[in-house]
Amino acid sequence: MTFSDGILTSDNMNQKSNSLQKRSINSIYTSNNRVSSNASPRNSIASSTNTSKYTGGLTATSTFSSLPDEQQSHASTSNSSAIEFLNNSMEDFGLIDTLDYEDIDDGLIDHENMHRSRETLIDSLLTSEETYTESLELVMRLFLLPLRKDAAHTSFNFLGMKKMICTEREFRWLFGNFEELVHVHRLTLKSLQERLRIWGPTQILSDVFQAWFPNLECYHDYLNNYAVALTTYERLTRYQPFKKFITTAHKDKSLKGASLLSLIQLPIGCIDRYVDIITKLFEATPTMHPDYSGLHKSKLWIQHFRHSIQDKLLDANNVNQVLILHQSLLGAPFSVRAERRLVIQGQLSRVVLNTKSIGEERLYMLFSDMLVFAKPKIEAKMAKLQYKGHLMLERAKVRVMSKEETDGIASCLEIVSSFSGVDNLNTTFIAGPTVHILHLRSDSEREIWLAKLECVIEKLNKIAAVKHAQATRRMIQSRAPRGNVSNSPTISSLSDESSSKECASYTS
């Protein structure tokens, strides 16, 4: 055998050594599985290592015995290196018994997850505040400032002069204290950005929140004017100069499909956004964090503020529903009013006693001043409501009808309206009373509609009585000689207070 054969033999021996190493590793895991509960993992691995060394030595000796002396000497050197490498590799596996995979620190993982949640919430707060402030700035730049400039220049439709887009009073009704909201959120965004420039794992944010909170009181005024703003917008969209201005402004690409109406409605959800993010941020903050106590106070404050405007937010959402229904109505002879609210709506049928039949179902909408019924339809791939009629409910009467009165038809209500006609631009054409018989699907549904109708009629009658008392007082004052009018409290002062309370009750 040649010297090259010896090299080949050495390579073969290295391959065998590697094979022995793999078998030894397998024997480690086999020994671990068979070891008793009292045995140490380190002892099991050591035992497997000694056995592997011994077995490897026998295998090498039996292989070299058939080689010549010179080749055996060279091969022995190579074999010794391979065995030494194997022994060193086995010693490295002694590290395995020092790793206890069952003792992972769950608290450390939870802490890391909470830290990531905090960072995500803070990023969400910054992004949402930037987007919201940008939307408010669009209203200022594209609508508020141009309309203010136009309203400041008094012009009349005389000798071809340009018509005003809106008057100064309509401008105030439309925007209310919108500019104050913009100023508040500019400061809010600036303070948030400044704090995040020096942000770190232990940095606090609650002091920034608490600096914002007093400025949020401006939302009370905005919500108080909300119904007037939407009513003014709806009325102005039927005025050609304003409609033309809005159509042109809506073509601005920075709006990205948004409209003035949607931007005016946007502040309604701002407080709920703050409540959601601050509450989640507090829950994602460890108790030992330096901002834990401050975030707890911030959470309580924003939740209390949200509760203080709860009724106003519900009323604003109701105003939105009323406006949507009015915009969907086709052929309605009346316009939207700032004090109108939606009470209940549903699919009902009208009973025709002459033919003893139940008519086709219609969508009945009970508002705070009238009952409107319409037929749903699809027009230009959009859901619309074809106006079919309405009943004025002031001094109306409603009662439950028995089966004998309706020729066996169950669950019926009779509404006798004192007025009928047209309420066009807040004026009413009065005609004779009408009788309307409604069929409901069950007696329980009938009771619900009966209670709602009686409540609306009662409130309308009280408001009508207050207005009549005020009109009577003004008539008496106008006829009395000057200097004889008493300054003592009269029915008018009491009536004014009662009227304001009744109007406010519609928002509930």
Image (spheres, rainbow, N blue to C red):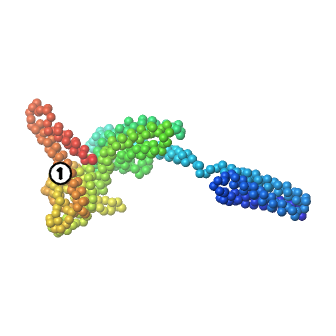
Q: Classify 10 Å Cα crowding around label 1: few (below 14), some (14-19), many (20 and above).
A: many
363 up-or-down from 204: above or below = below
Residue found farthest to the right: 69
Q: Is residue 196 above or below residue 372?
A: above
Residue closer to the observer: 98 or 231: 98
Q: Is residue 70 left or right of residue 247?
A: right
Q: Tell me which amino acid carries mark 1.
A: Glu
**What residue do we see at 72% from left, 56% from top?**
48
Q: Nearer the viewer, residue 54 or 114?
A: 54
- Element marked by disc 1: loop
Quarter of the image with the N terminus is bottom right
Residue nearest the viewer, comparing 150 with 367: 367
Q: Residue at x 27, y 61 (%)?
A: 347
Lateral position of residue 211 relative to residue 233, left or right: right
The residue drawn where x is 8% and y is 33% is 481
Residue nearest the observer in this picture, 365 or 407: 407
Does any portion of residue 131 appear in the rendered image? no
Q: Residue furthest top?
A: 483
- 184 lies left or right of 496: right
Q: Position of residue 237 (x, y in %)?
A: 31, 49
Is there any visible trace of residue 490 in the rendered image? Answer: yes
Residue 482 point in image, percent of width and height = 10, 32
**How many marks overall?**
1
Residue 202: x and y, percent? 52, 38
- Residue at which label 1 appears: 394
Residue name at image x 21 percent, y 56 percent: 450
